[in-house]
């Protein structure tokens, strides 16, 4: 009882928690007004709701799942029947090729999925009706078949040539006659086309005697053909009445209807004419033999019926065409394999496994090859053809230090000696040991070792077995890959393969020789500690040897001979006197901007200005910026990028300099300099020395200052003498309510920053110079006591609610 009450209370709490959500998103069944939908909208709705191509019972069930009422379902079925009835054209109207295309476009047929009946197997023959690029349209340009029956609506073209010349295009009337000028009516409806030709020619001979004498010829051809109405019933995807050209066949009509449905037969398609069975069409005859003898031409009011299949069998495994096949009475495993194209190359042909469905369960049947011809099928049988064993019956594998490794036949090489002699051992083959991996009687892997030299001499003999794997090792594999390292002032430093007898000069030459900065007076070789005679641990890491070597590497008797050992490290030092030129760049308001080579380590900013011809009259020395190759993190790189943008916006910099500043903003850092003081006091503390890659930019005298941050209108203000911090803020609209007054600061063009200073009740504002930037940051919001109290009260209420719930549960 107590447990039930606790569960009830938890469910009540859960429902109360979900109630606001359910109130916001009520579940409503979408209502569709079937009467107001056009035919095109109805087809689109059917496709979107996954209702197209279903049978009547499936349609009713699926529509109910979509939320349609019974009344709406009945309206939907009625609309679909009307749509199917209105698709064919009126009886007796002529059907041209464009008319047939219009009819096919109006009938939307859902092609059956190829693998609906079983897991991954297709129903053999279904691809004819599931692929959009396959068609069975009748050929309207072909010669008229002799067995074609002339009917009402056909147009006959009659050409008379010879002594007499005339041409007529005559249409067969509803009564079955054509009226030949000057001759009278001739009934041709219901006659085969060849008989109609002879009858017309005989009628014309009465008024053209030259026809009988052979001096005049008559040619009768079929012009526009009539359309016929054919009804498809039974197990087709889209049963109904279709208007087709009179040259259409059974296959044409089947394609127009979407082919047999899930249970439709492919081998039992019946054609009825006048209530009599005219032919039974088997699609497999066409697919397998190309036989279209039973694919008869259709006539008006013909009925095609697709019967349900009687037997279907799945064939899977090692066959050429895996599929689900429809079988007929008398078919057996041999005939089924023939339909499937026969066994695959890897098939195991001794037996076939068959899974059969009985009245209450499944059973496995093993059909041996001798019984294939006597085995008859039950519908639903699933046949599986195994593959041959994935192994060799007589193979051994040979690998390693051999001239001809690979797979060999144990029948031809029953012992190991003959196999090794045939494969040929390489010179580096390790002769003291080889191994054989094989399976014992329990198929457990085991390893056998042997002496290769004893095998070749015949002192030991080993018989080989199927699936043995023999490995001959290489002596090169058993040795460490010795190398010598070269670093320092050579053209190609790196690791090089050690060769016994290698000299110091050899490794220098292999590394491309000394480069220009190398010093041959101090070449250092470090060698590993590997004296195995000492058992005590040594404090030394390596043996160091310093050698002086002629940079010409001349082969003279005086040249030192030093033989290297594996894993030596050769270090070629740099000549202490060697110096490469370093360059700096100056741009902006100097007489001769450009790239300069630094003469000495003591050259400074003022020296560079002098070499560049001095500053121009409009140069702004206080705003000069120095960029230096220095590591910078992402924040410093962003600052440099912003500074470069500010310089471009405020100062007059040429386009070349703009591109340069933009490209270097990510790998250089601004150095705060005071060029004006450096020029006034050369070689003083402010006159810093130049380094490689320095870029000095001297801008023009700026005319404005800029405000940023928490002001109403951040803007540029024209500089004037006496302009103060407060003046800039006032001209920018004043502080925002969220501005932090005391944290404001000024950045000068050279990157120097000055903040507001406060002493007691007094504030000291930074001096404003041309090009200055005034930054007013936002105030960091702090929570008030009332806000903290509100949050605390809400938390207390929630805590009280949970305590009450716990108390109530415990009391139960």
Image (cartoon, rainbow, N blue to C red):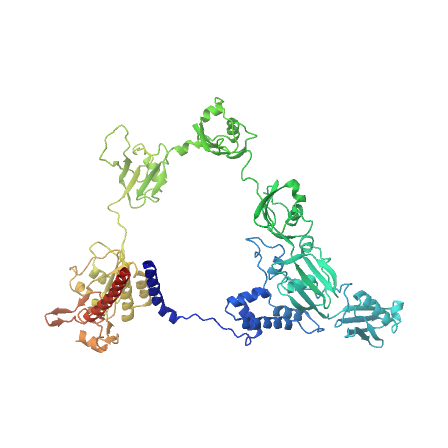
Nearer-the-camera pick, 61 or 223: 61
Q: Is residue 53 visible?
A: no
Q: Work out whether 289 lies above or below 77.
A: above
Judge left or right: residue 149 versus residue 655: right
User: Which residue of the protein is positioned furthest toward the front in this rendering?
Assistant: 1
- Give percent across and percent down for residue 605: 21, 60
User: Which residue of the protein is positioned furthest toward the top in this rendering?
Assistant: 459
Judge left or right: residue 374 versus residue 47: right
Q: Give the quadrant of the N terminus.
A: bottom left
Nearer-the-camera pick, 378 or 279: 378
Nearer-the-camera pick, 232 or 638: 232
* Residue 80, image quadrant: bottom right
Q: Work out whether 406 lies above or below 29.
A: above
Q: Is residue 94 visible?
A: yes
Nearer-the-camera pick, 138 or 10: 10
- Give percent across and percent down for residue 466: 53, 32
- Give percent across and percent down for residue 498: 36, 36
- Give percent across and percent down for residue 443: 48, 33
* Residue 206, image quadrant: bottom right
Q: Give the quadrant of the C terminus.
A: bottom left
Judge left or right: residue 276 versus residue 633: right
- Tag count: 0
């Amino acid at each position: 009882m107590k447990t039930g009450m606790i569960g009830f209370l938890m469910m009540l709490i859960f429902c109360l928690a979900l109630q606001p959500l359910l109130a916001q998103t009520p579940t409503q069944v979408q209502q569709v007004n079937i009467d107001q939908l056009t035919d095109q909208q109805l087809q689109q709705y059917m496709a979107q709701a996954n209702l197209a191509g279903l049978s009547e019972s499936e349609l009713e069930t699926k529509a109910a799942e979509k939320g349609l009422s019974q009344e709406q379902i009945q309206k939907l079925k009625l609309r679909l029947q009307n749509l199917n009835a209105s698709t064919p054209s009126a009886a007796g109207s002529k059907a041209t090729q464009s008319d047939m295309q219009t009819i096919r476009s109006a009938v939307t047929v859902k092609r059956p999925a190829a693998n609906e009946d079983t897991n991954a197997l297709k129903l053999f023959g279904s691809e004819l009706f599931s692929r959009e690029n396959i068609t069975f349209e009748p050929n309207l340009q072909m010669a008229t078949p002799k067995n074609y029956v002339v009917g009402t609506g056909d147009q006959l073209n009659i050409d008379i040539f010879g002594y007499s010349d005339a041409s007529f295009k005559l249409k067969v009337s509803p009564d079955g006659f054509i009226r030949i000028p000057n001759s009278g009516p001739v009934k041709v409806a219901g006659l085969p086309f060849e008989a109609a030709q002879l009858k017309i020619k005989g009628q014309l001979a009465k008024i053209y005697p030259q026809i009988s004498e052979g001096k005049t010829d008559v040619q009768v051809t079929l012009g526009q053909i009539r359309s016929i109405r054919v009804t498809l019933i039974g197990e087709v995807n889209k049963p109904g009445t279709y208007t087709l050209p009179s040259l259409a066949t059974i296959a044409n009509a089947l394609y127009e209807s979407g082919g047999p449905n899930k249970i439709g037969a492919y081998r039992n398609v019946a054609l009825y004419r006048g209530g009599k069975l005219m032919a039974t069409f088997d699609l497999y005859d066409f697919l397998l033999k190309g036989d279209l003898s039973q694919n008869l031409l259709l006539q008006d009011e013909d009925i095609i019926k697709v019967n349900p299949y009687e037997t279907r069998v799945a064939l899977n495994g090692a066959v050429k065409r895996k599929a689900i096949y429809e079988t007929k009475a008398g078919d057996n495993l041999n005939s089924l394999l023939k339909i499937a194209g026969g066994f695959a190359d890897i098939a195991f042909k001794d037996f076939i496994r068959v899974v059969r469905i009985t009245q209450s369960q499944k059973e496995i049947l093993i059909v041996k090859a001798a019984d294939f011809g006597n085995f008859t099928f039950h519908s639903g049988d699933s046949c599986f053809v195994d593959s041959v064993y994935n192994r060799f019956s007589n193979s051994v594998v040979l690998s390693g230090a051999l001239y001809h490794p690979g797979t060999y036949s144990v029948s031809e090489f029953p012992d190991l000696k003959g196999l090794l002699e045939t494969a040929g051992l390489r010179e580096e083959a390790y002769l003291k040991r080889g191994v054989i991996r094989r399976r014992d009687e329990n198929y457990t892997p085991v390893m056998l070792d042997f002496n290769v030299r004893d095998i070749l001499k015949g002192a030991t003999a080993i018989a080989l077995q199927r699936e043995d794997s023999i490995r001959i090792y290489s002596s090169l594999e058993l040795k460490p890959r010795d190398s010598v390292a070269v670093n320092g002032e050579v053209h190609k430093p790196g690791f090089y393969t050690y060769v016994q007898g290698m000299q110091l000069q050899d490794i220098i030459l292999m590394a491309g020789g000394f480069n220009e900065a190398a010093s041959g007076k101090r070449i250092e070789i470090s060698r590993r500690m590997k004296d195995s005679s000492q058992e005590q641990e040594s404090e030394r890491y390596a043996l160091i040897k310093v050698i002086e070597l002629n940079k010409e590497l001349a082969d003279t008797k005086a040249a030192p001979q030093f033989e290297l050992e594996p894993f030596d490290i050769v270090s070629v030092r740099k000549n202490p006197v060697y110096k490469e030129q370093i360059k700096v760049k100056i741009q902006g308001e100097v007489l001769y901007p450009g790239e300069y080579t630094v003469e000495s380590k003591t050259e400074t900013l003022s020296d560079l200005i002098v070499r560049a011809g001095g500053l121009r009259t409009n140069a702004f020395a206080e705003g000069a910026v120095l960029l230096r190759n220095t590591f910078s993190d992402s924040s410093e790189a962003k600052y440099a990028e912003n500074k470069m943008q500010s310089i471009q916006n405020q100062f007059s910099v040429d386009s070349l300099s703009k591109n340069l500043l933009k490209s270097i903003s990510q790998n250089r850092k601004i150095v705060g300099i005071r060029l004006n003081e450096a020029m006034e006091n050369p070689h003083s503390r402010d006159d810093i020395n130049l380094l490689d890659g320095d870029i000095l930019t001297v801008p023009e005298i700026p005319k404005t200052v800029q405000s940023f941050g928490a002001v109403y209108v951040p803007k540029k203000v024209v500089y004037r003498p006496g302009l103060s911090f407060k003046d800039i803020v006032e001209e920018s609209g004043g502080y925002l309510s969220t501005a932090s007054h005391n944290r404001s600061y000024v950045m000068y063009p050279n990157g120097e920053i000055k903040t507001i200073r406060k002493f007691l009740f007094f504030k000291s504002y930074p001096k404003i110079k041309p090009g200055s930037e005034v930054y007013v940051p936002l105030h960091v919001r702090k929570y008030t006591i009332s806000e903290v109290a509100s949050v605390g009260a809400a938390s207390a209420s929630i805590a009280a609610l949970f305590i009450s719930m716990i108390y109530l549960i415990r009391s139960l």
